[in-house]
Image: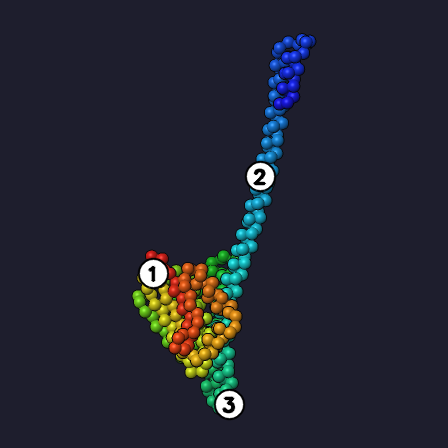
Amino acid sequence: MLSLVTYLAGAASSPVRAGSPSEYVVTAVVLVAVWGAGRSLRLRRAYLEELKDRAARLERAHAADTRAARAEERSRIARELHDVVAHHVSVMTVQAAAARRVLASDPDLAREALSAIEHTGRLAMAEMRNIVGVLRTDTRADARAELGPQPGVRDLPSLVEQMREAGLPTRLLVEGEPVALPAGVDLAAYRLVQEGLTNSLRHAGAGAEAVVTVRYEPYELDVRVEDDGRGAAQEMELSSPPGHGLVGIRERVALYGGILNIGPLPGGGFEVRARLPLKDGQ
């Protein structure tokens, strides 16, 4: 554009008329065309640079999202594995200790305890296979057929019975009209009860009893595990940092917008309680 203006100014002020007006017009058109081509080239280069920069930003954002998703998946896997392994290993440890104490005096009772250990080990292996199976990338029909459903509230009676066999007297109370639960809430409720009973088995002390209460309310599921232990569980919770199991419970309850209470009861004993919202009463 500067060349065109200079040319026109020079042509208009020059005392020498070396060419016809048409020649000046042609020259001006050529200069305009060259200027337009240069401008278009600069704009195209700027546009391509912007596209490259945008693609780089999108790639970085995608990589960050992928890392966050992988971290969340690792956390979920660790939480599931901990819940399965910690519970079953705790039960097996208690049963093995009981078998050792009565091995000489009551071989039949010791054999029953060993059978219970074997059964508990098989349950642990089955649950771990389910968790690992979910992580498999193989989507063939036969692979999917190997995967069992995740545990839920429907499986609490067998969990309570397992705790009784392990030596912790446990009762299950179901209040309200049962409704179909979302899969995530169903699993979260089961894991909360599992962790709460495992905590009672480890720390409530000899002679303690546990009560599991599941209350269905119109817009809420109230799940509570209480024991009447005399201080062991309270001391464990208040004097040591929270373990992975309790952290996992907090994460699960927070994920579904619930309210969690963990701590000693006023009259003695310990409580793990969660109130999980249900959308539209389901």
Residue 104 got which mark?
Answer: 3
Q: Amino acid at mark 1?
A: Tyr
Question: Looking at the image, which residue is at 39% across and 63% down?
Answer: 276
Q: Residue at x 34, y 60 (%)?
A: 219
Please provide percent x and percent y for residue 214.
36, 69
Residue type, label 2: Leu
If you read the primary sequence from the N terminus, does the residue marked by circle 1 or circle 3 appear first? 3
Q: Whole-percent x and y of residue 226?
A: 40, 74
**Residue under circle 1?**
219
Q: Taking 145 as reference, is 226 above or below it?
A: below
Circle 3 SS class: loop
Give the label, 1 or 2, closer to the camera: 1
Where does residue 84 sit, x and y in percent of width and height?
49, 69
134 w.r.t. 1: above or below? below
Label 2, secondary structure: give it.
helix
**Cα gap from disc 2 to disc 3, whole angstroms:** 79 Å
Q: Quadrant of the N terminus?
A: top right
3D distance between C-alphas at marks 1 and 3: 54 Å
Which residue is drawn at the image coordinates 44% and 72% (left, top)? 263
